[in-house]
Structures are given as C-alpha cells and as structure tokens.
Image (spheres, grey):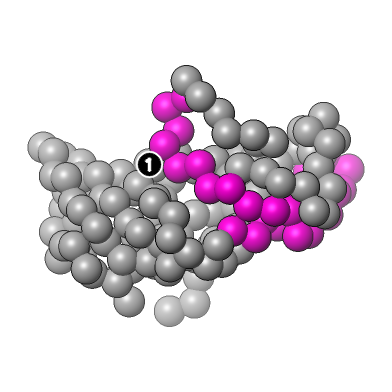
Amino acid sequence: MTLSIRNQLPGSVTAVHPGEAMATVEVRLDGGQKLTAAITLAAAEDLALAPGTPVRALVKSTEVSVATRRVEGLSIRNQLPGTVVGLTTGAAMASVRVSVPGGELTAAITRDAAIQLGLFVGSDVIALIKSTEVALETV
C-alpha cells in the first residue's frame, strides 16, 4: 500500500492499555525512542496488537509541531529530540525535516513560526506529536 503520509517510523509494540472505546499503545521505535498512540479499541483488536508486534507509526506532517527545547506542563506525550536537516519556506508555510534516531519526520508549520523559533539546518529541536494523531500499521 502506498500512502501520502510522509512520516512513517518503524518500531514494535511494548504495551497495550485497553479502555472502554480507546486503547493507548506504547511503541519502542527502531531508534530507541518511546512513542504513544491513542487508537480505537476496535482498531487495536483488529490489528491484534500485543507486545512484540512490529508496527509502523504514521503521522501527517501537519500534525507534527516543533519546539526548540523539551516542553514541560504539556499534555503532548510524544517529544522526540532531533536535528533540522531540511528547511523550506514559502509565503505562508514552512516544511521542516527533522532527523530523529531511526528515521526522519517532516513538520508543516507556519513560516512565521519557523522564523520566530530561529530554525536553521543544524538546529536541535523537539518534534511534538499528540498521541491521538499517531496511526499504526502492522508490518
């Protein structure tokens, strides 16, 4: 299957926490980072997710935010440190490519945000991803 989602990080499930309608799934990415996905319980069951299941975490670039340092007091659980390896700015938007251990993420942010953050190729950043914005694919 070919997808338009650019952000595809491989890993394996380390834990599944089912709730009434949703489940949180902990994933250890191939680069060693921990990622949490909040998916429907039905999806977790359909995918037969269990510890050890190989998966690919999928995140649209519009759902990735960028910070210049780790953020405290925030509900966003997924904070992946990385380095800017590509930066393209247009009239309104910017595309920020971030190298993280085991892969690469692209964030679509406003041009103004990229300027205000002082982003440049080589910047150390934190990619922020809400767990509800992470989809999982079994591989």
Query: Disc 1 on helix, strand or loop?
Result: helix
Outermost residue, right side: 91
Outermost residue, front side: 32
Residue at position x 61%, y 42% in the image: 126
Say if 115 sits above or below 93 in the image: above
Residue at which label 1 appears: 132
Residue at position x 51%, y 42% in the image: 79
**Kind of residue indicated by mark 1:** Thr
Locate residue 97: give its quadrant: bottom right
Nearest to the observer: residue 42 or residue 104: 104
Say if 68 sits above or below 8 in the image: above
Nearest to the observer: residue 26 or residue 5: 26
Residue at position x 24%, y 58% in the image: 14
Q: What range is drawn magenta here?
A: 74-100
Residue 99 percent coordinates (x, y): 65, 60
Residue 124 percent coordinates (x, y): 71, 46
Total marks in image: 1
Q: Is residue 27 magenta?
A: no
